[in-house]
Each structure stands twice: as C-alpha cells, then as structure tokens.
Image (cartoon, rainbow, N blue to C red):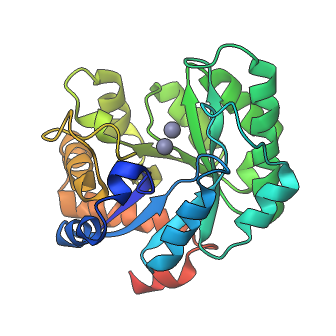
Amino acid sequence: MYVDSHCHIDFEDLAAQGEALFERMAAARVSHAVCIGVNLENIERVLTLARSRSNLFATVGVHPEHTEGEEPDQARLEALAADPKVIAIGETGLDYYWHKDRPEWQRERFRTHIRAARACGKPLVIHTRDSSEDVIRILAEEQAQEVGGVMHCFTENLAVAHAAMDLGFYISFSGIVTFKNAAQIKDVAASIPLERILIETDSPYLAPVPHRGKMNEPSYVPHVAAEVARLRGISVEALAAATTANFFQLFRAAAPNQAAAC
Ligand SMILES: [Zn+2]
Ligand SMILES: [Zn+2]
C-alpha cells in the first residue's frame, strides 16, 4: 500500500472527478492521502473533504505563494489544527522564486506557523524554493525539531537534506524524481536513509513519468515509488512498505488508528 503524503485534491479539476478519483486511488493501492491546506479561503473545503473519508487527512496553513487574503495568527492556526483530521501545519515555508519582495514578512509568517505547530504538537509540511538556507536556519531558531515534519516536493541537494534530517525532518519526493533531468534529486533519493523517505504527488501538478504533462492525481504515486525503488536497487514493495511506515511514524500522534490499521 502507498500513501500520497501531499496532494491538492480540493482544487477544482480534481474535485470535479468525484468518486472516480477515489476508485482509481484504491485500484492503484494508494491507501491514504493528505489534502494540503494552502490558505484560509480553501480550508473549509479541505476539512470537509478529509472528514468525508476515513483515508483522507488534512493540513492547515498558508502557502508561501499566497500573499493576499486573510492572514491567520498563531491562535487561529492552532484553533483550526485542533480538528482531529488535521495531522500537520502547512504547507508553509519560504518561496524566494515567486516572491522576492517582502522576505522579512514571509519569514515572520513562517515563524508563526512553526510556533503554532509546536503549540499544538503537530508536525510541519515545508515548502522551500530558492530559500533553503533561510528555511533551515529558521526551523532551527524556532526549535522545529520538537515537532519535526516533512520537506515536501524535495528539489534541494544532499547537504540540505541532511540539515533537514538533523532537525528530525523527513524528505518527500514527488513526480520530479522521475524526470530525466533531475540528476541531483535522484542522487538524494538514492542515498538518504530509507527510514526518512516519504512519497507524494503534489497533484494536480508535476505528474510523474509516464503521465508527465497531464493532470496529476493520487493514484499516480506508485510511479514515484517505483523510481525511488529503482534508484536504490530495492523492490517497489519494500519502498512502499517503508514509506507508508514512515508516514505513520511521523504523524503517529495525529493518525494513530490508521497506523494500527496498516
Ligand atoms: Zn509546495
Ligand atoms: Zn503543495
């Protein structure tokens, strides 16, 4: 069984698929998926979706690319995260690729998310783009190792992976690892400890080979698993079992029953 640790199935095109999406997930042996919150405007949709199925979880946070709209303070994040279906705070982090302006504001908002995660004892889902140095520094300064989390859609180098793992974080690979030109990411996937690896789709974006360029969905996560397994020279079954166990290890406080069921 596989877990898609990061998807956006509340987004319009995926939400429009209805039951068929979950049927394809089951057929592909994807047992669980995490629907990621990206702003306060979509959070009710994310929570409603997660509550509607036992194999879906949710997260609460404001994506670094989301720079307008309502801004939650720490108390608001904590209140939303109290929902039993919420297993993490995020996605949060820093994105200096799309947003070079107001970096200090981005960093303050990131700190607010880390403080909320520590206050409610739930891990973090981290997005980083052109910002890994500041992300690692702020995680350390804010003692994020107390809750840990996941570096989602990992595209950094091995040194960044180790710095994150030193803070208790897991490394999640998306469909990018299946792309031909992703040499650095393939190297990381081949060499970090198996017990720190998660897999994800980040759907509807970044569909893995052989679906590259199409709309992505949770049922494609086995393609990510197959590539990471190939790079490591292990069976896809072993990779699936390890990443599923890792997922429930990281989120054990928030998803204990499901861990038992697996
Ligand atoms: Zn992201
Ligand atoms: Zn995402």
Residue 222: x %, y % from top left: 22, 55
Quick check: 184 above or below 54? above
Q: In which quarter of the image is the N terminus?
A: bottom left
Question: Is residue 110 in sight in this rendering?
Answer: yes
Q: Nearer the viewer, residue 161 or 56?
A: 56
Q: Which residue lies furthest to the left in this view?
A: 210
Q: Nearer the viewer, residue 31 or 212?
A: 212
Residue 19, quarter of the rendered image: bottom left
Residue 43: x %, y % from top left: 62, 57
Quick check: 4 above or below 61? below
**Residue at figure coordinates x 77%, y 29% from the top left:** 107
Q: In this image, 257 relative to 224: left or right?
A: right
Q: Nearer the viewer, residue 190 or 174?
A: 174
**Residue at figure coordinates x 57%, y 43% from the top left:** 165
Q: Quadrant of the C terminus?
A: bottom left
Question: How many numbered tags mark residues here?
Answer: 0
Residue 76, quarter of the rendered image: bottom right
Residue 252: x %, y % from top left: 58, 72
Quick check: 14 above or below 257? above
Residue 131: x %, y % from top left: 61, 22
Quick check: 100 above or below 109? above
**Residue at figure coordinates x 46%, y 85% from the top left:** 260
